Amino acid sequence: MAFKADAAKIKRWREERHWSQEHLAELAGIGLRTVQRIENGEPASRDSLMALAAAFNVEALALCVDPEAEAVERIRQHKAKGRAALQLSFWIHLASYVLGMVIFAGISLGMGGFTMKWPMIWWTVGIVGHAFPVVLLDIVTRYQEQH
Protein backbone atom coordinates (compact mmCIF):
# COMPACT_ATOMS: atom_id res chain seq x y z
CA MET A 1 0.00 0.00 0.00
CA ALA A 2 1.36 3.43 -0.95
CA PHE A 3 1.16 6.45 1.31
CA LYS A 4 1.14 10.07 0.21
CA ALA A 5 4.23 11.61 1.74
CA ASP A 6 4.54 15.34 2.35
CA ALA A 7 7.28 15.91 -0.23
CA ALA A 8 7.79 19.58 0.61
CA LYS A 9 8.20 18.82 4.32
CA ILE A 10 10.70 16.01 3.68
CA LYS A 11 12.74 18.19 1.34
CA ARG A 12 12.59 21.15 3.75
CA TRP A 13 13.70 19.03 6.70
CA ARG A 14 16.54 17.54 4.66
CA GLU A 15 17.73 20.98 3.55
CA GLU A 16 17.43 22.41 7.10
CA ARG A 17 19.82 19.70 8.27
CA HIS A 18 22.11 20.39 5.28
CA TRP A 19 21.83 16.79 4.15
CA SER A 20 22.15 15.70 0.55
CA GLN A 21 19.69 13.22 -0.90
CA GLU A 22 22.49 10.65 -0.89
CA HIS A 23 23.14 11.22 2.82
CA LEU A 24 19.44 10.92 3.66
CA ALA A 25 19.17 7.72 1.62
CA GLU A 26 22.19 6.30 3.45
CA LEU A 27 20.82 7.26 6.89
CA ALA A 28 17.41 5.81 6.10
CA GLY A 29 18.78 2.69 4.44
CA ILE A 30 16.78 3.24 1.25
CA GLY A 31 17.85 3.93 -2.30
CA LEU A 32 18.73 7.36 -3.63
CA ARG A 33 16.13 6.99 -6.37
CA THR A 34 13.48 6.31 -3.70
CA VAL A 35 14.34 9.56 -1.92
CA GLN A 36 14.19 11.42 -5.23
CA ARG A 37 10.79 9.93 -6.09
CA ILE A 38 9.37 10.75 -2.67
CA GLU A 39 10.64 14.35 -2.86
CA ASN A 40 9.02 14.66 -6.29
CA GLY A 41 5.64 13.82 -4.76
CA GLU A 42 5.28 10.22 -5.87
CA PRO A 43 3.65 7.75 -3.45
CA ALA A 44 5.92 6.04 -0.92
CA SER A 45 5.71 2.60 0.61
CA ARG A 46 5.11 2.17 4.32
CA ASP A 47 8.65 0.85 4.80
CA SER A 48 10.21 3.82 3.02
CA LEU A 49 8.26 6.25 5.18
CA MET A 50 9.22 4.37 8.34
CA ALA A 51 12.88 4.47 7.30
CA LEU A 52 12.74 8.20 6.57
CA ALA A 53 10.95 8.83 9.87
CA ALA A 54 13.71 6.98 11.70
CA ALA A 55 16.35 9.05 9.89
CA PHE A 56 14.59 12.29 10.87
CA ASN A 57 13.85 10.91 14.36
CA VAL A 58 10.10 11.59 14.07
CA GLU A 59 6.96 9.49 13.77
CA ALA A 60 5.99 8.27 10.31
CA LEU A 61 2.68 10.15 10.46
CA ALA A 62 4.63 13.42 10.60
CA LEU A 63 5.84 12.70 7.06
CA CYS A 64 2.39 11.98 5.61
CA VAL A 65 -0.01 14.47 4.10
CA ASP A 66 -3.18 14.93 6.11
CA PRO A 67 -6.01 14.32 3.59
CA GLU A 68 -8.37 16.59 5.51
CA ALA A 69 -5.88 19.46 5.55
CA GLU A 70 -5.17 18.89 1.87
CA ALA A 71 -8.89 19.04 1.05
CA VAL A 72 -9.30 22.24 3.07
CA GLU A 73 -6.34 23.79 1.24
CA ARG A 74 -7.79 22.83 -2.16
CA ILE A 75 -11.14 24.40 -1.25
CA ARG A 76 -9.37 27.55 -0.04
CA GLN A 77 -7.40 27.77 -3.29
CA HIS A 78 -10.56 27.23 -5.35
CA LYS A 79 -12.36 30.01 -3.48
CA ALA A 80 -9.37 32.33 -3.83
CA LYS A 81 -9.28 31.66 -7.57
CA GLY A 82 -13.00 32.51 -7.84
CA ARG A 83 -12.52 35.74 -5.87
CA ALA A 84 -9.59 36.71 -8.09
CA ALA A 85 -11.66 36.07 -11.22
CA LEU A 86 -14.53 38.20 -9.89
CA GLN A 87 -12.16 41.03 -8.99
CA LEU A 88 -10.47 40.86 -12.39
CA SER A 89 -13.82 41.02 -14.17
CA PHE A 90 -14.72 44.07 -12.06
CA TRP A 91 -11.45 45.86 -12.92
CA ILE A 92 -11.97 45.13 -16.62
CA HIS A 93 -15.54 46.43 -16.34
CA LEU A 94 -14.32 49.55 -14.50
CA ALA A 95 -11.66 50.26 -17.14
CA SER A 96 -14.20 49.95 -19.94
CA TYR A 97 -16.59 52.14 -17.92
CA VAL A 98 -14.00 54.92 -17.61
CA LEU A 99 -13.19 54.72 -21.32
CA GLY A 100 -16.90 54.68 -22.18
CA MET A 101 -17.60 57.71 -20.00
CA VAL A 102 -14.83 59.64 -21.73
CA ILE A 103 -16.29 58.73 -25.13
CA PHE A 104 -19.84 59.55 -24.01
CA ALA A 105 -18.67 62.90 -22.61
CA GLY A 106 -16.93 63.63 -25.92
CA ILE A 107 -20.08 62.79 -27.87
CA SER A 108 -22.23 64.92 -25.55
CA LEU A 109 -19.87 67.90 -25.75
CA GLY A 110 -19.54 67.54 -29.52
CA MET A 111 -23.30 67.59 -30.01
CA GLY A 112 -23.76 70.58 -27.73
CA GLY A 113 -26.02 68.92 -25.18
CA PHE A 114 -26.19 66.09 -22.72
CA THR A 115 -27.37 63.52 -25.26
CA MET A 116 -25.65 60.52 -23.67
CA LYS A 117 -27.25 61.03 -20.25
CA TRP A 118 -29.28 57.79 -20.11
CA PRO A 119 -26.50 55.46 -21.30
CA MET A 120 -24.20 57.06 -18.71
CA ILE A 121 -26.76 56.63 -15.95
CA TRP A 122 -27.49 52.98 -16.75
CA TRP A 123 -23.84 52.06 -17.18
CA THR A 124 -23.17 53.65 -13.78
CA VAL A 125 -25.96 51.52 -12.30
CA GLY A 126 -24.34 48.48 -13.91
CA ILE A 127 -20.88 49.21 -12.53
CA VAL A 128 -22.30 49.80 -9.04
CA GLY A 129 -24.22 46.53 -9.34
CA HIS A 130 -21.00 44.76 -10.30
CA ALA A 131 -19.04 46.41 -7.47
CA PHE A 132 -21.54 45.31 -4.82
CA PRO A 133 -20.78 41.55 -4.89
CA VAL A 134 -17.04 42.24 -5.14
CA VAL A 135 -17.09 44.40 -2.01
CA LEU A 136 -19.48 42.07 -0.19
CA LEU A 137 -17.32 39.03 -0.96
CA ASP A 138 -14.22 40.90 0.23
CA ILE A 139 -15.93 41.84 3.52
CA VAL A 140 -17.16 38.28 4.11
CA THR A 141 -13.72 36.82 3.32
CA ARG A 142 -11.97 39.17 5.73
CA TYR A 143 -14.53 38.38 8.44
CA GLN A 144 -14.05 34.63 7.96
CA GLU A 145 -10.26 34.95 8.09
CA GLN A 146 -10.47 36.84 11.38
CA HIS A 147 -12.71 34.22 13.00
Image: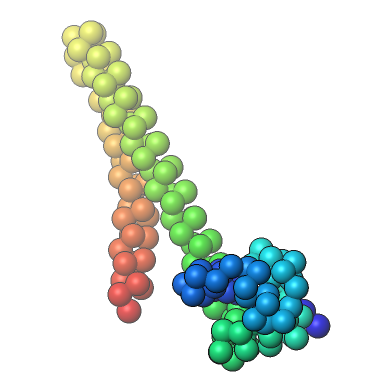
Residue 145, given in percent of the width and then of the height, sits at 35, 72
On screen, 126 above or below 108? Answer: below
Q: Nearer the viewer, residue 57 or 127?
A: 57
Residue, x 44% and y 51% (percent of image)?
Answer: 84
Residue, x 66% and y 63% (percent of image)?
Answer: 40
Determine the image quadrant of residue 45: bottom right
Left-right relation of 32 to 59: right
Q: Residue furthest right?
A: 1
Residue, x 32% and y 24% (percent of image)?
Answer: 99
Q: Which quadrant would the N terminus be assigned to in this image?
A: bottom right
Q: Nearer the viewer, residue 50 or 5?
A: 50
**Total numbered labels placed on residues in the image:** 0
Q: How is the image coloured?
A: rainbow
Q: Which quadrant would the C terminus be assigned to in this image?
A: bottom left
On screen, 27 above or below 112? Answer: below
Q: Nearer the viewer, residue 106 or 70?
A: 70
On screen, 18 above or below 91? Answer: below
Residue 108, given in percent of the width and then of the height, sits at 23, 15
Left-right relation of 26 to 102: right
Residue 142, given in percent of the width and then of the height, sits at 31, 67
On screen, 67 above or below 102? Answer: below
Residue, x 68% and y 77% (percent of image)?
Answer: 26
Please indicate, yes or no, whether residue 39 appears anywhere in the rendered image.
yes
Please indicate, yes or no, whether residue 73 appears anywhere in the rendered image.
no
